[in-house]
C-alpha cells in the first residue's frame, strides 16, 4: 500500500487509481479464470503493485499463461521480484511475464480468454479510454471475458457535474453501451473495498 501511494502521488497521471484495490475486488475481477474447462490465456493491464496479479496467478491451471502489462518501472520491478518470480519458481507447468510499457504500444499477438484491466477509465480522456477499450475487446478470444472496475457512484456523479467532466462522463457511458451491445454483461458490486466498486465483466460471443 505504501509503495502504491508514493507512486500514485509522484506519477498521478500514470497511476490514476485512488487507492490500491483489496482482495475482495480482486476475487470478483478474476472469477472467470480457472475451472472453466479450457487453458487460460490471461492479459492483465495496469497491474500496479499486483492487487489483482496474485489472484490471477493463483487461479491459473496447468498450461495457463499470463501477460502482465504495467507502465510504471518501479511497479514492474516489484511485480517481477515479489510476485511473478516466486510464483514461477513453484509453477513450472504454467507461465507469466511482466511487460513494461503502455498497453497501446505492447506487441500482443495472441488472443486472450480473460482480460483483467485495472486502469481507471473514468479518469482518462474519452479518446484514450476508447482506444484502449477497443484494443482490449479486439484481443479477446471468442467467448472470452474482459473485466474492469468502476468506483461505485463515480460515473453517475460525474454525469451530474457541469462542464467538461459531465461531457466526458456521458460520452464514456455511451461508448461503453455501444461496446458492450454485442456482449453479455455482468456487474458485481464489491462493498468490502477501500472504496466500494463495481467489477464489470463483458463476455464476447463464442465461436
Image (spheres, rainbow, N blue to C red):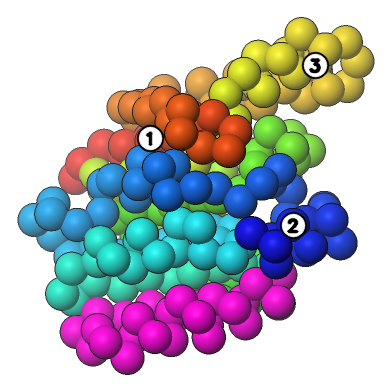
Sequence-first tag of 3 and 2: 2
The answer to whether 198 appears left or right of 78 in the picture is left
Q: What stretch of residues is rendered in magenta?
A: 72-98
Residue 185: image quadrant is top left
Query: Which residue is at 61% across, 51% downward?
Result: 20
Q: Nearer the viewer, residue 60 or 192?
A: 192
Which of the pair 19/205 is nearer the observer?
A: 19
The residue at the point 70 percent across, 77 percent down is 73
Q: Earlier in the sequence, mark 2 or mark 1?
A: 2
Rendered-image quadrant of the C terminus: top left
The circle on residue 5 is 2
Query: 16 above or below 55?
Result: above
Position in image of residue 105 (x %, y %): 65, 68
Local secondary structure at mark 3: helix
Residue located 44% across and 63% down the image: 53
Mark 3 and mark 2: span between their CA atoms? Answer: 27 Å
> In the shown orientation, is residue 128 left or right of residue 178?
right
Is the magenta region chiefly helix, strand or loop?
Answer: helix
Label total for image:
3
Res. 69 visible in picture = yes
Q: Is residue 84 in the magenta section?
A: yes
Whichever of callouts 3 and 1 sits on the residue coming sooner in the sequence is: 3
Graded by Cα atoms within 10 Å as few (under 14), some (14 to 19) or many (20 or more), the crowding at tag 3 reads some
Report which residue position mark 3 lands on: 166
Quarter of the view holding residue 122: top right
Q: Which mark is residue 202?
A: 1
Amino acid at each position: 500500500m505504501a509503495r502504491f501511494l508514493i507512486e500514485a502521488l509522484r506519477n498521478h497521471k500514470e497511476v490514476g487509481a485512488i487507492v490500491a484495490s483489496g482482495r475482495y475486488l480482486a476475487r470478483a475481477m478474476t472469477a472467470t479464470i480457472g475451472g472453466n474447462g479450457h487453458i487460460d490465456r490471461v492479459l492483465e493491464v495496469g497491474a500496479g503493485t499486483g492487487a489483482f496479479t496474485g489472484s490471477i496467478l493463483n487461479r491459473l491451471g496447468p498450461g495457463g499463461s499470463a501477460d502482465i502489462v504495467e507502465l510504471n518501472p518501479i511497479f514492474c520491478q516489484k511485480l517481477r521480484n515479489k510476485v511473478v518470480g516466486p510464483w514461477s519458481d513453484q509453477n513450472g507447468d504454467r507461465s507469466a511475464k511482466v511487460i513494461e510499457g503502455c498497453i497501446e504500444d505492447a506487441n500482443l499477438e495472441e488472443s486472450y480468454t480473460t482480460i483483467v484491466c485495472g486502469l481507471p477509465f473514468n479518469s482518462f480522456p474519452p479518446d484514450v479510454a476508447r482506444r484502449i477499450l477497443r484494443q482490449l475487446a479486439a484481443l479477446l478470444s471468442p467467448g472470452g471475458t474482459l473485466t474492469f472496475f468502476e468506483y461505485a457512484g463515480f460515473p453517475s456523479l460525474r454525469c451530474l457535474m457541469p462542464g467538461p467532466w459531465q461531457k466526458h462522463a456521458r460520452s464514456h457511458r455511451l461508448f461503453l453501451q455501444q461496446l458492450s451491445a454485442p456482449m453479455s454483461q455482468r456487474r458485481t458490486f464489491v462493498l468490502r473495498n477501500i472504496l466500494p466498486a463495481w467489477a464489470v465483466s463483458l463476455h464476447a460471443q463464442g465461436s
